[in-house]
Every structure is written in structure tokens, then in C-alpha cells.
Image: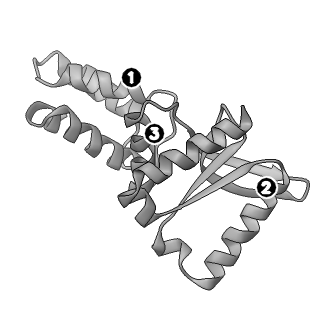
Amino acid sequence: VDLANTHPLGQVARMLDNAWGRRLLHLGELAETVRDVRSRGRRGMRMLDLLIDERRGMTPTESGLERRFAHILTKAGERPFRRQVNFSDHEGWICRADFADDSSPTVAFMDGDTYHRALLDRRHDDMQTRRLTATGLTVLRFSDLTILYEPATVLARVRRARERAA
């Protein structure tokens, strides 16, 4: 609430998303706090109302790479993907995908080095990809370098997956 009084919208949005993604705050609790302090004439309350309303019904991203992926799509005018979606097959639960596209049978994973570099991690990712593909899904996996430095590649792959499904 204090930061909304002194910082521009973009910075407050980023800080909100970071705290929300790390489960340091809940949107409902923030909305209550905004209601409580609004009567005291605090500046920045309309900004917080806007940010809260934009995020209602959404699941927060869980990493900077996920936030960057969502930003790449939004900036290009692409429909957003749903976040943190569980998938199962006849064997049971497969995984929780970082993103799933409601307009095509496409899921996307942000494979940062921290959790996807080791051999066992890569084998696990390959197993997930095989099982998801067997259910008819197109699986997009993006490295942290691709997300950070090649947004055009990210967009092209998303658009190709959507075009194939159309």
C-alpha cells in the first residue's frame, strides 16, 4: 500500500506479482487492506484497485521466467495462457504445467537451469513430455535463455502451435 503511494504503476505491478507468486500476500487480504486505508485519504488506492481487479480469478506465476513468458504474450497481443494447470492420463497424474492454452491443445513449461539442467531433471522432463504428447497435447519447453533473450522465438513457437490446432 505504501509503495503504491510513491512508485509508478509498472513497478508496483511487478512487486505485487513477485509477492503474490511467492505466496507472501493474498489478493483478498490486499483488497481488504486497501478498503481499510482508503478512508484515510491515501494516494495510490485506485492503482491498487486496478491491479487487484486485473488479477482476480488468476493463478499467480511462480517464477520470473513464468512472468516473462506471460509478458511476452501480452505485449504481442496474444491471448494469455492459463497458469499452473494439472494434467493426468490413464496412468494417473502427470504434472502441473506452467501454462496451458485454452484455445489449442498446447502446454508450456519454463525450464530454467536451476531445476532442469541435471540429467535426472532432463529425464523427468522427457517423461512428462512423452506422456503429455500421448494425450494429444503439444508441449512447448523454453529454456531460461530463450525466454530472456529470444522473445520472437517464443512467440513464433506459440503461434505455430496455435495455427496447427486451428
| Residue at which label 1 appears | 53
Question: Which residue corresponds to the image point at 76% horizontal and 48% vertical from the top-left?
Answer: 137
**Residue flagged by tag 3: what amino acid is it?**
Leu
Q: Is residue 63 visible?
A: no
Q: Residue at x 52, y 28 (%)?
A: 57
Q: Name the secondary structure under disc 2.
A: helix
Amino acid on which the number 1 mark rests in the picture? Asp
Residue closest to the eye, 36 or 144: 144
Instruction: Indicate the position of residue 88 as horizontal and vertical percent values.
Output: 80, 51
Q: Quadrant of the C terminus?
A: top right
Q: Mark 3 sits on what residue?
A: 73
Disc 2 + disc 1, Cβ < 8 Å: no
The residues tagged by marks 2 and 1 sit, at their Cα atoms, a distance apart of 35 Å
Q: Which dot, 2 or 1, sits closer to the camera? A: 2
Residue behind mark 2: 133
Q: The disc labelled 2 sits on which kind of residue?
A: Thr
Give the mark, 3 or 1, whose residue is nearer the N terminus: 1
Q: Nearer the viewer, residue 39 or 80?
A: 80
**Which percent across, then down, holds residue 63?**
43, 56
The label on residue 160 is none
66 relative to 11, above or below: below
Between residues 33 and 97, which one lies in front from this camera angle? 97
Q: Is residue 156 left or right of residue 43?
A: right
Does the CB distance between marks 3 and 1 fall below 8 Å?
A: no
Q: Is residue 24 left or right of residue 85?
A: left
Q: Residues within 10 Å of mark 2 (few under 14, many from 20)?
A: some
Alpha carbons under labels 3 and 1: distance apart: 20 Å
Whole-percent x and y of residue 104? 69, 36
Which numbered disc, 3 or 1, marks the residue closer to the eye? 3
Mark 2 / mark 1, whichever is N-terminal? 1
Quadrant including the N terminus:
top left
